[in-house]
Amino acid sequence: MEAKPKLKRIENELLTVPNPTIELRLNELMLRLYEDLNDYKNAFKYSTKYYELKDSIFGIEKREELIRINLRGKYAEQKLQDSLINAEQIKLEKIHAAKEKEINDQKAHTSRLLMIGLIIALGLILGIIILVYRNYRKKTENHLAPKMLM
């Protein structure tokens, strides 16, 4: 009989500071106490409270577990998305580098073609100058040759 007042005191204290786990244990102890005392009306009352609270705690635990699972899933999804974004950035950087290399190669090729064109143009100009000079020299020689014969 000493247990009953102590359990009632704990029950009253739980009203001011609710703690579902302690309340569950208290209802279980009260259920057992009233069963031992053959007070089935109160045993049923605490049995009902006990199972309602147990289901409530179980539901809370399941909800918390679902939230944890959901958060883990979102974290994994975010991590995957971040790695995909990172992979996409790396791919874009490689494409950018390849395009830069292609542009630089094209510029180098254009510069080589321009240089070759300039060399050919200078060669042609030099050839024309040589031909003009030879023609001029022949004309002057032909002009001077008859005067020397006289």
Image (cartoon, grey):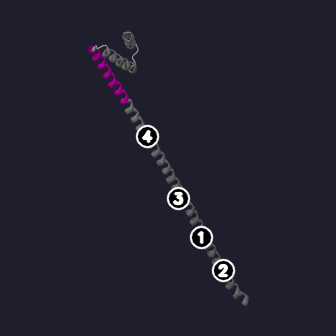
Residue type for callout 1: Ala
Q: Which residue is mark 3?
A: 102
Cα distance, mark 3 to mark 4?
A: 38 Å
Residue plotted at (33% across, 22% down)? 53
In the rendered view, would you say 117 is above or below 94? below
Q: Is residue 121 left or right of residue 77?
A: right
Residue type for callout 4: Ala
Residue type for callout 3: Glu
Magenta highlight range = 40-62
Residue 121: mark: 1
User: Of helix, strand and loop, which one carries label 2?
Assistant: helix
Estimate the x, y position of residue 54 in percent, counting from the top left.
34, 24
In the rendered view, would you say 130 is above or below 26? below
The quadrant holding residue 124 is bottom right
Location of the C terminus by quadrant is bottom right
Query: Closer to us: mark 4 or mark 1?
Result: 4
Cα distance, mark 2 to mark 1?
A: 20 Å
Query: Closer to us: mark 1 or mark 3?
Result: 3
Query: Looking at the image, is mark 2 or mark 1 earlier in the sequence?
Result: 1
Q: Is residue 45 magenta?
A: yes
Using a 10 Å C-alpha cutoff, classify the residue at mark 3 as few (fewer than 14 neighbours), some (14 to 19) or many (20 or more).
few
Q: Which residue is mark 4?
A: 76
Query: Looking at the image, is mark 4 or mark 2 earlier in the sequence?
Result: 4
Q: Which residue is mark 2?
A: 134
Q: Is residue 88 magenta?
A: no
Query: Closer to us: mark 3 or mark 4?
Result: 4
Cα distance, mark 2 to mark 3?
A: 47 Å
